[in-house]
Image: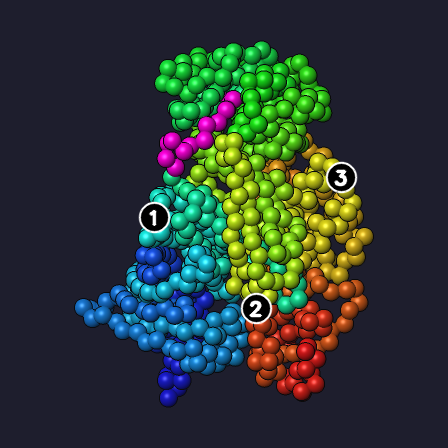
Amino acid sequence: MKIKNFLSIVLVFAVFMSVFSDGYIIPIPRPRPRPVPIRHLTVNYHKVYINVDNQLVTTKVVQEFHNPNNFIFEGDYIFPVPEGAVITKFNIWEKGKKLKGELLDAAEARRIYSDIVRRMRDPGLLEWMNSKAYRVRIFPIGAGKNKKIEMEYTEMLNNENGLLRYRYPLKIENLGKEKIKEVFIECNIKSNEPIRNIYSTTHDISISERGEKSARISFEKNNIIPDKDFILYYSISKKDVGINLITFKEGNEDGFFAALFAPKSQVDKKNIQPKNIVFVFDRSGSMSGKKIVQAKAGLKFCIEHLNEKDNFNIIAFSDYIERLSRTLLKANSGNVKKAIAFIKDFNANGGTDIYTSLEEGLSYLKGETRNYLIFLTDGLPTVGTTNVIKILNNVAKKNRTNTKLFVWGVGYDVNTHFLDKLANKNKGFSEYIEPEEDIEIKISNFYSKIQNPFLAELKFSVSGIDIYDVFPKELPDLFSGSQLVIAGRYKRNGNADIILRGIIGRDKIVYKKKVDFPIENSHSPTIAYIWAARKIGYLTEQVRLNNDQELIDEIIRLSKKYGIVTEYTSFLAREDSIAVSKADSRVRFESIAKPAMDKLSGRHAVKQSKKLKTMKYAQTAQSNVYYNEEGTKVIIDTLSNIAQQSFVKKGNVWNTLDIKKGQKTDLKVQTFSDGYFQLLDKYPDLVKYFSLSNNIIINYKGKILEINEKEGEKKLLKKQLEMFE
């Protein structure tokens, strides 16, 4: 009887711990009695293969677990089943016999989950309480051996106005924080209609293959703990530009939106818009060695991939200028060969005359649209006009043809403030190539994206709904095979038209789509964090280039609300930031920000600029990392954000930052008591907060609620339950 009871407790523990990821095993030890200590199974790899055939999706999961102990184990494997999915295969064999599993419906799973939460005193399971679950008993796993599991399930995706959404349960909550050695996700999409937008709000995906009606997407990371589910959107449309809308709105707050625009991925040669492009490359003495070799290879790639109707020129500069031609050249085979020979011959020597080279480059560009200047340098101006303010002003005056200026800074000896302003004032962008990065690859990847211009001089608007705080502020040109994501806020709700205006050739074009801005939509909370990251990145860049007190206050407010840490708001991750006044926050911001913002060049300045660019154009929710004064990455794990409320860890208690100094607790409830579950039954949205920790202080509907594992109310009266209504 004692052994039976012991096994049942261990089994419950196994069920409890195994649901925290998409599938996990916590073993039941053999032989008995239980050996001490027991090490949990580790995951060697976790691979997901997704095949989308129109709206039908087949997901194959392959995992390999490792038993690090010196004795045999057995355990339960549990997989939380997505809504509407059907398990079609489960492949694991033991001694020639295929093991069978059982599907627990939501009610049965909830009963088991609730019981486990009470017994094991861990809240991580709460978020799965309304999910179905697939459970399989895994027969003995040998000491030091691996166990491979394969399963497959199918589901149908909903088509909402041409937009389809796929979700894979990858999130892990409060598991033993063992890193997974390899996480790999591959998704192949086939469609009868042309595929336009492909977008993940949660993970930085790469698109390795892209056709008009097919695509291959992947995500790969090593030695990580997955902290969010994998969500992928893709859209279908027969129109030249796919237009889609993703929204998030809860309660009485204004909503968030992400508008997606993607033109055809493949364009007939006869429809490719010609461009004028001048390459201005630094060949000063500091570019010698590996840098000049890689830069020349990257430039050669660009020249070899010019379109037939393009016009181009090359300026190689140091303290004097060498030019390929006195005029723009047609990109025919003869001129391309001439350009490649020119690139081969120039060497690195002399000083750095930035202004004269830019002035020369701009002089070749004519007309009003599709003029591009790519400028690469690894240093500061040392010859000619060296005052960066004069250079900025003079370049702006000389740029009379609406030329987009793309700036590449190589290494750490560049003035990031100058290069950032140079790009911003000329409707381009700046990017930095660090010493350990490959210049050739960075340049060729960038050029591949801008190779085929589609729509220039973009203007975005919405008719029928009030929108505000839209980012990015300056819209880039739209290129074939690329994608534009615009994030913003909206007031009220209802039907509206999304409108994108631009120029193709000499023609003014308008693309429009009718969409719905809903009164409530809680499916895509990451949209709020993407918007917040973009706004913080934009404001911080403005403060970095032009100090402004009002902007500083707004950066601090947004960072606190959305739990987003930057180089300048890292103090928010400290426990002494709880209930700090606005004035004190500004003092702390300036004490950190001023030394950092004063740095014009060097490793830290480059890291700052790159981080801010990532935030300004964020397409996924940002990880909480920043770069310290040495330019070293710092990962923050004492700050968390749930439902737009930030928490700082003080000891073992997560405290809300949304609290005033001296504000008292309105209700304290003991963790896992009857009162705890009374609250969850009456206010189900508390699950997202409670799953963070056993000890948490929340601002819930204007009241301060404390959950404490050692003390508090164990059973609640009616009036206590109703105080949050």
Give the left or right position of residue 107, taking residue 492 as reference: left
As for residue 271 lying within the magenta part, the answer is yes
Q: Magenta stretch?
A: 267-279
- Disc 1/disc 3 C-alpha distance (Å): 48 Å
How many other residues sit within 10 Å of disc 3, few (<14), some (14-19) or many (≥20)? Answer: some
**Which residue is identified by label 3?**
547
Give the image location of residue 486, x and y in percent. 56, 48
Relative to 14, residue 214 above or below = above
- Disc 2/disc 3 C-alpha distance (Å): 38 Å
Query: Considering the numbered disc 2 on the image, is that residue within a helix, a strand or a loop?
Result: helix
Give the image location of residue 533, x and y in percent. 61, 49
**Which residue is identified by label 2?**
688
The disc at residue 214 is 1
How many other residues sit within 10 Å of disc 1, few (<14), some (14-19) or many (≥20)? Answer: some
Give the image location of residue 491, x and y in percent. 65, 59
Give the left or right position of residue 244, taking residue 379 as reference: left
Query: Considering the numbered disc 3 on the image, is that residue within a helix, a strand or a loop?
Result: loop
Q: N-terminal of the two: label 2 or label 3?
A: 3
Relative to 606, residue 638 above or below = below
Quarter of the image with the N terminus is bottom left
